[in-house]
Image: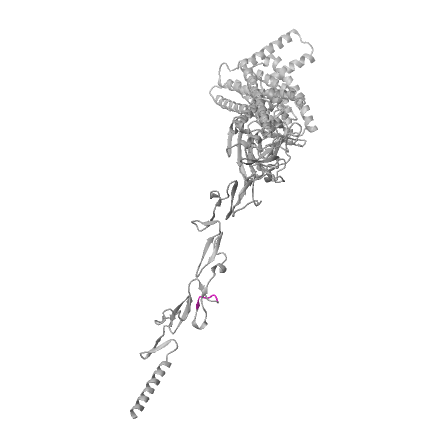
């Protein structure tokens, strides 16, 4: 009994010690071996290996000293959108729906598909992923026979649809279909949607076809829409028959083929390349002749060109063609397909560039015939035939125009181009680059009289010295004009001209009589002066009488040619004087020109220049207001004049240099050198008078040049007076001769001795003149 009590007391003692030891360890620790050690709450229970543990599913347990925490797996989070939590929180991990959390998690054209625990992006239906993880459209139309017979496949982004060919329709009546596929059956609609347009639909063995009405054609494409074809442009060819028979034959052939087309004939005989080549060949030939000698013929020519190109377009098989010849450059674009084309295309030749919308080329989509062509045709010399027809320009009183670009025709298969919704843009390169000039975009208006340039419907978008950009709301033949401004002939300017020229004519006549009748002063230099004065006298007389005689074009051109010749002759004689002075200084013997050589240089050279200019550009003579050279032709005078002035300056410089050397020599002939020096000074002054006059004349073709106009008029009008003063009044010998001439009328008769003395004196003066060749100045 006593032993049991002891055992019981021992057990109570031990259990109390154990309880005291365990209660002394904190939560999360276990007492072992007499100490508290951390309890691994995350340890897997070997008896229950499938137990999710204290964190539950989709989470991992992480032990810490005295505790633990839970962390959600990747792609999961708690209900409070956190990834870490403790067991006391009673939170659980659930899947994150990334597709809802971030709507832009996938790229364009992709769907977000959520999975547990992640997500993935899949391309939309009808698209496939590429190597860059982007999505490309799947062209379902590449699948063979996806739409069945008599139907065509139209691919769209992510899908496709089928439409029946022209003349066929789906059995259900729907315009398009995908799946289930429907058979397309031959149909002929009779309502306003009739695909034949101005034709009658029939069902044939190969499906429906169109029988076009009179005046309409589908150019041999039996299933295509019938469009209007105007053959009138090929009928008015009588002028071609007379002047260009080969062109008349082609026009007659085109007329017959055109009429055959409108009657439903098979056009297979028309070879596109051969027809186009022959057409361009004939156009080139016409432009090489003078057949287009009036505006009516130009209008007929351009209308025929547009109609012929429009008729040729449907037969062109190549998508793009370029052709060039001596007088023509062509680029064409030919498009064919079931759908009306869209977008902007660019065509260009050397002188012009065209930007045009394909909607303009094809026309109304509901009337689209299945083809569309656009032509850009530039002409090398058409401006020479049309440079005087400006009645449609409404010019100001002092304004005139000159063509400053090559002309270009724009033609399309769409016949309705009189009012375009989107304007065409043309860029023209200038023939003459002039800073500050005003340029105007124009077209050839055949309805204005017999034809004229007009600016209606065209606007200048941009212009500088090199090119002009035009915007036009219709199609035709286009060009760029440069506006010129004539100085108005005010009353004061007319008075200065008449008084000055009259005085110059009197002075020049006195000079001519002096140099031709007074033998004592005659020499090679006075011969040059005589013909210089004759040239200026005739030029001034023609100018005074005929400069405004513009009533008859031929007469006006002759007057302009004579003025061109005599003004150039004056410069040539002035050049001969410089050469003569050069010979007098350089050569010791044979210093004088032979008269034949002087005549060849003084009159032959200007005659050759004028003849060449008249052959190259006969229309350059005569303007709308004056019988003078046209502005774009003025360099045929100013160019040679500048060359002659440059040659004169060269000879004067050499002469002055040689004179300086002779003056510094050991034994200079001072008397002769002083006279040559005086001659040179006079010649230089004469050059300054004539040269300065035409320097002012160069500024007569811009606005606000009134001052220059007065200076030019004054210098030109007083040239004769200045020459009279320099060559007659400044010459002592000429003054003496004038005194002797006047004394015969005022002094009484002298005795024989005096008469003998006077004769002896004149003989001595004549001998002196022959020694020196000229009088003192």
Picture quadrant of residue 731: top right
Q: Nearer the viewer, residue 160 or 437?
A: 160
Task: Estimate the x, y position of residue 313 in percent, counting from the top left.
Answer: 55, 32
Task: Estimate the x, y position of residue 751 in percent, counting from the top left.
Answer: 66, 7
Q: Which residues are magenta?
A: 80-84
Picture quadrant of residue 338: top right
Tell me the chief SS of the magenta region: loop
The N terminus sits in image quarter: bottom left
Q: Going 32% across and 80% down the picture, which residue do you hit?
A: 34
Q: Nearer the viewer, residue 610 or 380?
A: 380
Q: Nearer the viewer, residue 257 or 108?
A: 257
Report whether 695 appears left or right of 18. right
Q: Is residue 684 visible?
A: no
Most extreme residue toward the right is 491
Up-down: is 21 above or below 458?
A: below
Task: Give yes or no for residue 435 being in the magenta stretch.
Answer: no
Up-down: is 511 above or below 632?
A: above
Task: Estimate the x, y position of residue 610 in percent, counting from the top left.
Answer: 57, 20
């Amino acid at each position: 009994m006593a032993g049991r009590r002891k055992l019981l007391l021992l057990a109570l003692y031990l259990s109390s010690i154990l309880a005291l030891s365990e209660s002394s360890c904190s939560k999360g620790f276990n007492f072992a071996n007499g100490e508290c050690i951390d309890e691994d709450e995350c340890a897997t229970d070997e008896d229950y290996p499938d137990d999710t543990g204290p964190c539950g599913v989709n989470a991992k347990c992480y032990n810490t000293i005295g505790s633990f925490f839970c962390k959600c797996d990747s792609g999961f989070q708690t209900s409070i959108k956190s990834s870490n939590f403790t067991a006391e929180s009673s939170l659980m991990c659930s899947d994150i729906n990334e597709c809802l959390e971030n709507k832009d998690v996938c790229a364009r054209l992709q769907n977000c598909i959520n999975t547990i625990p992640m997500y993935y992006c899949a391309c939309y239906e009808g698209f496939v992923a590429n190597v860059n993880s982007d999505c490309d459209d799947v062209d379902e139309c590449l699948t063979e026979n996806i739409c069945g017979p008599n139907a065509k496949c139209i691919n769209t982004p992510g899908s496709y649809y089928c439409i029946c060919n022209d003349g066929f329709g789906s059995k259900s009546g729907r315009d398009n279909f995908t799946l289930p596929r429907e058979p397309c059956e031959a149909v002929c609609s009779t309502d306003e949607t009739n695909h034949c347009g101005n034709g009658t639909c029939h069902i044939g063995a190969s499906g429906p076809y169109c029988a076009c009405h009179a005046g309409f054609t589908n150019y041999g494409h039996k299933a295509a829409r019938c469009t209007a074809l105007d053959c009138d442009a090929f009928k008015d060819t009588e002028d071609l028959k007379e002047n260009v028979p080969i062109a008349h034959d082609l026009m007659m052939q085109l007329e017959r083929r055109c009429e055959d087309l409108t009657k439903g004939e098979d056009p297979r005989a028309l070879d596109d390349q051969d027809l186009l080549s022959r057409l361009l060949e004939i156009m080139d030939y016409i432009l090489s002749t003078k057949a287009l000698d009036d505006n009516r013929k130009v209008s007929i020519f351009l209308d025929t060109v547009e109609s012929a190109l429009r008729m040729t377009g449907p037969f062109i098989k190549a998508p793009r063609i370029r052709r060039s010849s001596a007088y023509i450059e062509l680029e064409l674009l030919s498009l064919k397909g079931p759908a009306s084309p869209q977008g902007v295309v660019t065509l260009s030749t050397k002188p012009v560039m065209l930007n045009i919308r394909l909607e303009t080329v094809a026309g109304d989509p509901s009337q689209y015939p299945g083809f569309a062509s656009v032509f850009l045709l530039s002409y090398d010399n058409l401006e020479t035939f049309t440079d005087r027809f400006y009645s449609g320009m409404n010019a100001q009183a002092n304004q005139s125009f000159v063509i400053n670009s090559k002309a270009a025709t724009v033609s399309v298969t769409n016949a309705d181009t009189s009012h375009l919704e989107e304007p065409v843009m043309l860029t023209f390169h200038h023939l003459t680059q002039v800073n500050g000039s005003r340029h105007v975009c124009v077209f050839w208006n055949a309805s204005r009289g017999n034809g004229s340039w007009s600016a209606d419907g065209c606007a200048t978008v941009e212009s500088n010295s090199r090119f002009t950009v035009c915007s036009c709301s219709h199609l035709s033949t286009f060009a760029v004009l440069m506006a010129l401004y004539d100085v108005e002939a005010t009353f004061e300017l007319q008075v200065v001209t008449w008084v000055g020229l009259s005085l110059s004519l009197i002075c020049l006549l006195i000079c001519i009589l002096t140099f031709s009748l007074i033998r004592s002063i005659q020499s090679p230099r006075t011969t040059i002066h005589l013909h210089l004065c004759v040239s200026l006298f005739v030029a001034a007389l023609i100018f005074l009488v005929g400069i405004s005689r513009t009533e008859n074009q031929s007469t006006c051109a002759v007057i302009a040619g004579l003025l061109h010749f005599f003004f150039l002759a004056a410069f040539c004689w002035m050049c001969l004087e410089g050469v003569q002075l050069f010979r007098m200084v350089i050569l010791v013997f044979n210093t004088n020109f032979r008269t034949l050589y002087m005549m060849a240089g003084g009159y032959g050279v200007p005659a050759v220049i004028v003849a060449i200019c008249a052959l190259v550009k006969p229309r350059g003579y005569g303007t709308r207001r004056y019988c003078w050279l046209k502005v774009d032709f003025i360099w045929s005078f100013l160019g040679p004049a500048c060359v002659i002035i440059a040659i004169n300056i060269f000879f004067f410089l050499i002469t002055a240099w040689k004179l300086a050397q002779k003056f510094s020599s050991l034994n200079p002939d001072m008397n002769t050198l002083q006279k040559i020096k005086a001659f040179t000074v006079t010649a230089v002054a004469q050059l300054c008078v004539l040269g300065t006059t035409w320097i002012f004349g160069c500024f007569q073709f811009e606005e606000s040049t009134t001052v220059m106009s007065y200076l030019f008029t004054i210098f030109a009008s007083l040239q004769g007076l200045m020459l009279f003063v320099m060559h007659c009044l400044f010459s002592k010998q000429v003054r003496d001769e004038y005194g002797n001439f006047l004394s015969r009328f005022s002094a009484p008769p002298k005795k024989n001795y005096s008469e003998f003395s006077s004769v002896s004196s004149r003989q001595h003066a004549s001998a002196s003149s022959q020694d020196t060749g000229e009088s003192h100045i």
